[in-house]
Amino acid sequence: MFATDDSIVAIATPLGRGGIGVVRISGPASPAIAAAILDLRGALVPRFATFTRVRPRAAADRRETFDEVITTYFPAPHSYTGEHVVEISAHGNPVVLRAIVESAMAAGARLARPGEFTLRAFLNGKRDLVQAEAVADLIAAATPLQARVAFDQLEGTLTARIAAIDAQLFDLIARLEASLDFPDEGYHFIEPAETARAVAGVVERVDELLGGARRGRLIREGATVVIAGRPNVGKSSVFNALVGADRAIVTDVAGTTRDLVSEQMDLHGLAVTLVDTAGCRDSADRVEREGVLRAARAREIADLLLVVIDRSEPATAEDHELLAQTETRPRIIVLNKRDLPAAGDVVAACGANPPGSRRTCVCVSATTGAGLDELRCAIVRELTGAESLRDPAAVTNARHIGLLEQARASLLAAHQAAASGETPEEFVLTDLQEARARLDEIVGARTSEDVLRHIFARFCIGK
Ligand SMILES: Nc1nc2c(ncn2[C@@H]2O[C@H](COP(=O)(O)OP(=O)(O)OP(=O)(O)O)[C@@H](O)[C@H]2O)c(=O)[nH]1
Ligand SMILES: [Mg+2]
């Protein structure tokens, strides 16, 4: 997988028709391949848009062209991959683009594997692993906030913060090693207490990164919010009101919704999958029973539950059962139908956020839209613990979080050993080196082929 001496080709734009479609060729032979398939008057000028024609097959009849194209040549190392790259912008038609790829293959290129362009950029030192992963995230982003966080990482914000921690560790390790290398001089380059202090400082910086990580991961991966409640309380109405479309069927018949209905939405930048479910009740109807079962399963995997209660009716046994069942889960109690007079005891039974409780209760009317903005804010707050996501987290990726946590554990072990003042410096050193190795893995300074394979398998062809 990691051979880079051949030249690769792929369509870099999405499948389908559009104004422009781009074929990308990367590798030592790309200028020669371009010369073979294009109708060029001379050598391609670096980083210059050349208007030319493309031929169906290498060395075919020069008059037989099938598209006019703009070609740009980026000589190594100043290209996306760090190799010679030729980008051919043709008209965005799959037939034309595939024919260009076939011509390039006939002229010696190999079809690129998913993520292979970005893999080459990583192997050639154009990007570290965090930045390569950020490319995939940026391409996959569904909300502007996701895109911004991915772009921050592409720019190297996280890389720089990890490098700063790594530099602190390196300095500490060098001083400890010097102490070990010159034991006879009776001189310590660093005293155990100072080592402990310095390690504590590094832990603090790792904690700063991990602090926003839960929020960061939510931003990157999105969250699943499941609507639950007994039949007819207005779950589907709340669902439709939140997604802003008549997506789920609403009727006054209890047991309208049978299957799960889900819709993606952008909530203050968070990518939320909202799921409407069948109302919880015992039913003799086989179809409805299956729906109730699916609803229960959906509740299990939810990051957050919206437990809908009809505030205009006295609370039923089913309401109380669901409230008890979801007591320990992250949830918001949604008191719906606030446009109707309230049945007093419902509000008392489940409403009115009692002081000091973590219970979040929002009063809405799916019919008039009242309270929905408050509900949206409450959802974001419950999921992220923050009012606003204007200051997004630096760490968003589960792989990075895992490695940072491992580094932190080694740092804590080093700290404990140094603070005791009795553990030999070799042990402290081993823990510190271990922590450094984990940080190196994040940016890809030492990463196994398996991990790389896994990471780049997420990409599509042409990236
Ligand atoms: N007045 C009023 N009526 C509402 C409100 N929300 C829903 N309804 C009505 O309540 C009835 C049930 O609404 P649905 O959204 O279908 O309720 P559901 O919880 O999805 O019901 P099932 O799918 O059967 O479990 C419909 O007649 C809605 O028009 C509201 O805020 N105010
Ligand atoms: Mg429904």
Image (cartoon, helix red, strand yellow):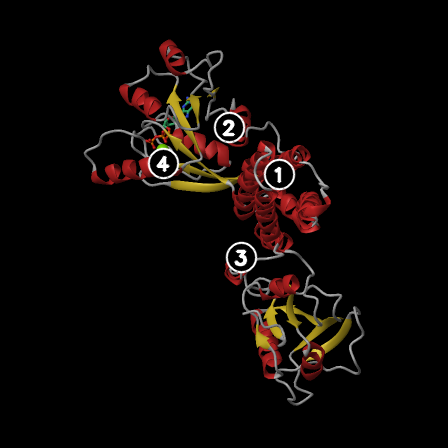
Residue 243 relative to residue 31: left or right: left
Q: Position of residue 228 (x, y in %)?
A: 37, 30
Quadrant assignment, res 230 = top left
Look at mark 4 in the image and give the residue it sits on.
300
Residue type at mark 3 is: Ile
Look at mark 3 in the image and give the residue it sits on.
455
Q: Quadrant of ligand 1?
A: top left
Q: From mark 1 to mark 4, how far is it between C-alphas?
A: 32 Å
Disc 3 is placed on an element classified as helix
**For the residues bearing labels 2 and 3, Cβ distance under 8 angstroms:** no
- Say if disc 1 is inside 8 Å of ligand 1: no
Dot 2 or dot 3: first in sequence order is 2
Q: From mark 2 to mark 4, how far is it between C-alphas?
A: 17 Å
Answer few, some or many: residues within 10 Å of disc 1's Cα (few below 14, many 20 plus, some between 14 and 19): some
Residue at point 66%, 45% (across, down) = 162
Q: Is residue 85 visible?
A: yes
Q: Position of residue 290 (x, y in %)?
A: 26, 40
Residue type at mark 4 is: Glu
Residue at point 63%, 47% (across, down) = 150
Residue at point 58%, 39% (across, down) = 414
Which label sits on residue 206?
A: 1
Dot 2 or dot 4: first in sequence order is 4
Question: Foreground mark, 1 or 2?
Answer: 1
Comparing 202 with 442, the one in front is: 202
Residue type at mark 2 is: Glu
Answer few, some or many: residues within 10 Å of disc 3's Cα (few below 14, many 20 plus, some between 14 and 19): some
Disc 1 is placed on an element classified as helix
